[in-house]
Image (tube, helix red, strand yellow):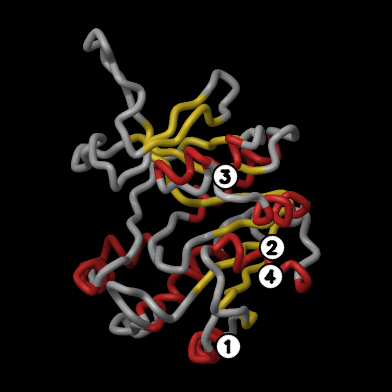
Amino acid sequence: MKSTAVIPARYSSVRFPGKVLADRTGKPLIQHVYERVAKAKLIHRVIVAADDDRIIQAVRAFGGEAIMTRRDHQNGTSRITETLGHIDSPIIVNVQGDEPEIEPALIDGAVQALLDHPDCPVATLASPFSKAEDPSNPNIVKVVLDQRGRALYFSRALIPFSRDGAPAAPLKHVGIYVYRREFLSNYVALPPSPLEKIEHLEQLRILENGYPIAVAIGEAHFHGIDTPEQYEAFVQRSKTPRAAKRT
């Protein structure tokens, strides 16, 4: 069953305008993402869904495929849905355009989770926390699963909460989404749900409307680029032998 990865990329960014075209490594940021995604074994096609011709030209310059989309999309899922007329794959993978160190094996794991759960229209990824990460940080989304590997809930709060102090191993949510093609149009037509509005987590709209989400678990070590400082750290990592080996 063929899968197409769509990377939504917009030029404007409040904290780092034009970040997907930042190229101090010798490549634009979006190229790093594209090349990492293309290494996933279960991905058969990679497309950048952009809102600016500068991104389109940059992607085509390195031999990638790009599609122009409207600028008024509220989120990446909506932008991806606009590209469906150009895609015939039954599985669509949403990979963020600012994650240049994303691990291809984790993308494969998320795709495999959807294949292994035919009752689920969506799959995503969770990872154990690293020692340097604080599970109580509300900027890191947590997820709890049922015994079948499906999401029970996503929250910015620390879940599960250990009432008696027993050891708990929270999982952080990693924002890779794998969709069955036919579900995407239904999903973006749903209105924002009550819990989604409270937590500011779009994936809760899926659960609140009764759709199950399969969750793969893998060790995620990559971080998205949101600020110039984070990009500078990425530039420095890209100069090290370890980064070069992982790339």
Q: How crowded is mark 3: few (under 14 residues within 10 Å), some or many (20 or more)?
A: many
The Cα–Cα distance between marks 3 and 2, rounded to whole angstroms, is 15 Å
Quadrant including the C terminus:
bottom left
The type of residue carrying mark 4 is Glu
Q: Is residue 8 above or below residue 145?
A: below
Residue mark closest to the camera, 1 vs 4:
4
The type of residue carrying mark 3 is Ala
Q: Name the residue at 32% across, 74% down.
A: 14
Q: Which residue position is annotated with label 3?
A: 110
Q: Which residue position is annotated with label 4?
A: 82
x, y percentage for residue 21? 40, 83
Residue mark closest to the camera, 1 vs 2:
1
Residue 141 horizontal side relative to residue 94, left or right: left
Q: How crowded is mark 2: few (under 14 residues within 10 Å), some or many (20 or more)?
A: some
x, y percentage for residue 120? 69, 36
Dot 3: element: helix
Give whichever of 64, 16 is nearer the camera: 16
Q: Which residue position is annotated with label 2?
A: 44
Residue 104 horizontal side relative to residue 90, left or right: left
Q: Which residue position is annotated with label 1?
A: 60
Residue 233 horizontal side relative to residue 48, left or right: left
Dot placed on the residue nearer the N-terminal end, 3 or 2: 2
The type of residue carrying mark 1 is Arg
Dot placed on the residue nearer the N-terminal end, 4 or 3: 4
Give whichever of 183, 239 is nearer the camera: 183
Which quadrant would residue 121 be assigned to in this image?
top right
